[in-house]
Amino acid sequence: DQQVKQNSPSLSVQEGRISILNCDYTNSMFDYFLWYKKYPAEGPTFLISISSIKDKNEDGRFTVFLNKSAKHLSLHIVPSQPGDSAVYFCAASAGNNNDMRFGAGTRLTVKP
Amino acid sequence: DTEVTQTPKHLVMGMTNKKSLKCEQHMGHRAMYWYKQKAKKPPELMFVYSYEKLSINESVPSRFSPECPNSSLLNLHLHALQPEDSALYLCASSPGGRVRYNEQFFGPGTRLTVL
């Protein structure tokens, strides 16, 4: 049962433009959401998070938006850079972050 | 030291072998995790140790046996594995404790192949 879904396995964007990565979830108990970035041969690294009491969190070029009624979140990267090319995982947890569920990931390619 | 290390990076084993995966962190984190990740799939949680006690076991077969000798170390003992257990095994840690929301720091993983 895939509780966190990333329906786009890949995304290609031109350098300098906006990248939008999407994530949907089914468990209404999830109250904390995270984005991780993964380069080949490395473990996922934490990027940005948002709790369910907010609908937006911004950190430099990265902004995460949360739409609780639609059970949808998105990660915006502006402007996109070639170094952003990686696999991005959406993750969610309910109350206790010890049990975190991941989406399948979206491979972002930023072309120079 | 702000990283999680895992050894070995690659492991090839037969179905009758016994081997162990090791994970180490020196960030003072009190929660440690094992995940399994198959190709093009999300990481799947296997075990969670909180304050060196097993707090979550996601119905993992007994051929996988976790061990947390101290707050910095986490082992995963492997015995009589099947070829379908071939995957990337990720270790992670997080501060734990009373911090409700704390991000997990991942190691680079061990690529396991079972022949």
Image: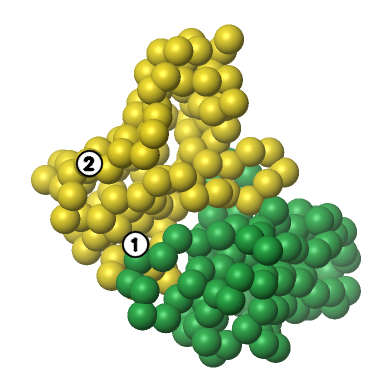
Chain colours: A yellow, B green
In the figure, is residue B31 to the left or right of B14?
left
Labels 1 and 2 in the same subunit: yes
- The amino acid sitting under disc 1 is Ser
Q: Which residue is at a point 31% across and 39% down the rendered structure image?
A: A58
Residue B87: x %, y % from top left: 69, 55
SS class, disc 1? strand
- Of callouts 1 and 2, which one flags the residue occurring earlier in the amino acid sequence? 2
Q: Which residue is mark 2?
A: A56
Q: CA distance from mark 1 to mark 2?
A: 17 Å
Q: Does residue B87 sit above or below B35 in this rendering?
A: above
Residue A93 — which label? 1
Q: Does residue A65 sit above or below B47 in this rendering?
A: above
Q: Residues within 10 Å of mark 2 (few under 14, many from 20)?
A: some
Q: Which residue is at a point 58% across and 10% down the rendered structure image?
A: A112
Residue B106: x %, y % from top left: 60, 58
The image quarter in which residue B112 lies: bottom right
Residue B101 or B89: which is nearer the viewer?
B101
Q: Does residue A102 sit above or below B72 in this rendering?
A: above
Q: Which residue is at a point 67% across and 79% down the rendered structure image?
A: B72
Name the image quarter holding the N terminus of chain A. bottom left
Q: How many marks?
A: 2
- The amino acid sitting under disc 2 is Lys
In the figure, is residue B52 to the left or right of B99?
right
